[in-house]
Structures are given as C-alpha cells and as structure tokens.
Amino acid sequence: MRILIVEDDAQLARQLGRTLEEQRYTVDMARDGEVALDMIFDQPCDLIILDLMLPKRDGLSVLQEIRQAGIPTPVLILTAKGETDDRIRGLDLGADDYLGKPFSLAELLARARALLRRGSENVQPVLEVGDIRLNTITREVTSSTQKVSLTPKEFSLLEFLLYNKNRAVSRLSLAEHVWGEDFDPFTMSNSIDVHIKNLRKKIGDTDSSIIQTLRSVGYIIRDGDS
C-alpha cells in the first residue's frame, strides 16, 4: 500500500518514512502543498498523512481541494499542540483522523493501520496467484501456507505486480513505485533485477513461472488460465 507524507519538516518526514517503510508500506513524500496536490492527482495512494502548516499551500486548502474533487483517500492530519480550531476545521473539511504534535510513532502506526483498514473495507485485502497469497492489511505473504519473510522492497514489488496481474509492468514503473524519488536511473534496472531474483527465490518461483520476464519491457504475473 502507498502512503503519501506531506510534511515540510525534513527530519520528521524522514523519520516517518523510515518507520512506515519498515512496516512494508511504500512511501512518497511532499514538502509543500502544491507538490502534494500534483502527486495526489497524478498517482492514487491509500493514505495521506498531512501536516497543516505547509509552504505554498497549507494543509487545509489541500484537504479542501481533494475532497471537492471527489478523492476519498483517507487523510490523517498532523497539528501542533493546541491548534483545536484547525483540528475541528480539518475534520469538517473531510479529514478522517488527526494527531497532535508531538506524537509517538506507535500511535501514528496504529492510526494509519485503522484508516487503511477502513479504506480497504470494500477492497479485496488478499492478492493471490497460484499458492502465493499476499495480505495487504496484515502485510503477510504465504507460499503453500508457509509464511514468507520479505524485505519491504520485495514486498512492495510483489504487491505492485499482483495489483497489476495480467498487465505488463515496466522496470520504470516498478522503480517509481518502490523506490520513489530515490531511484537512480543509471542503476535501477540491475537493482530491480537483483530484487526480483531474491523475491523469486523466497516465494519458490525457481522456474520464473510466477514472475515472468518480458524482455526489453519488465515483468508480469499472469493468472494460471491466462
């Protein structure tokens, strides 16, 4: 699942990003309201963690615009201690929950999980192909009922491929989804291939029949009947 962090405090944003990535979420970041809006309208995400005090466009105006556009993505707003009026207005504008700074990372994770569950109520939480099952809520992967331990990037690769089952996924799309702005276009292809190789080994895809390579394109996971 993809989470967008909109926070201009670089240190806090990095801390939140590391914490969420350790839980195998894919994390994107925006430092101001204008960039956040561009990212939200350009690529859907599953949760937005939105600071209210932002450069260029404040969090409340970002929230108002996405709700007016009919975007239902759950929004967790971050507010400074004592900003009661902003919290109330944020909830009135369509925020789903709020956290007052300072907050514990454990509490943020709990709030995020709750909002992601709520947003997934009408979405199939389990993605599968053959004997491979990936639960997007519990973040667990099993192969023939045996639990598979994946790194956050391996999990994100498998999740993205399963979401796009029966569709070719380019290496560039994989890089943008899993690595975000951190990927190096000069080395990304080799890095992705290495991660895919490790992922195949862990899920028992020794003959590459599950994650199939499309030469000069990328990868695809097909249904057994496809």
Image (cartoon, rainbow, N blue to C red):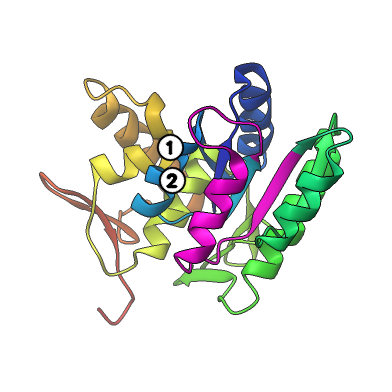
Position of 191 compared to 74: left or right? left
Q: Is residue 71 magenta?
A: yes
The image position of residue 64, as x and y in percent, is 56, 56
Residue 116 visible in the snapshot: yes
Tell me where residue 190 sits by quadrant. top left
Q: Amino acid at mark 2?
A: Leu
Residue 208, compared with residue 187, is above or below; it is below
Q: Quadrant of the N terminus?
A: bottom right
Q: Which residue is mark 2?
A: 37
Q: Which residue is mark 1?
A: 34
The image position of residue 79, as x and y in percent, is 77, 37
Residue 123, compared with residue 36, is above or below; it is below
Q: Residue at x 21, y 20 (%)?
A: 186
Q: Residue at x 79, y 48 (%)?
A: 87
Position of 65 compared to 150: left or right? left
Alpha carbon distance from label 1 to label 2: 5 Å
Residue 168, compared with residue 106, is above or below; it is below
Per the image, label 2 sits on a secondary structure element best described as: helix
Q: Is the C-beta separation of discs 1 and 2 under 8 Å? A: yes
Q: Which residues are magenta?
A: 51-78
Tell me where residue 13 sits by quadrant. top right
Residue 204 visible in the snapshot: no
User: Which is nearer the eye, 222 or 10?
Assistant: 10
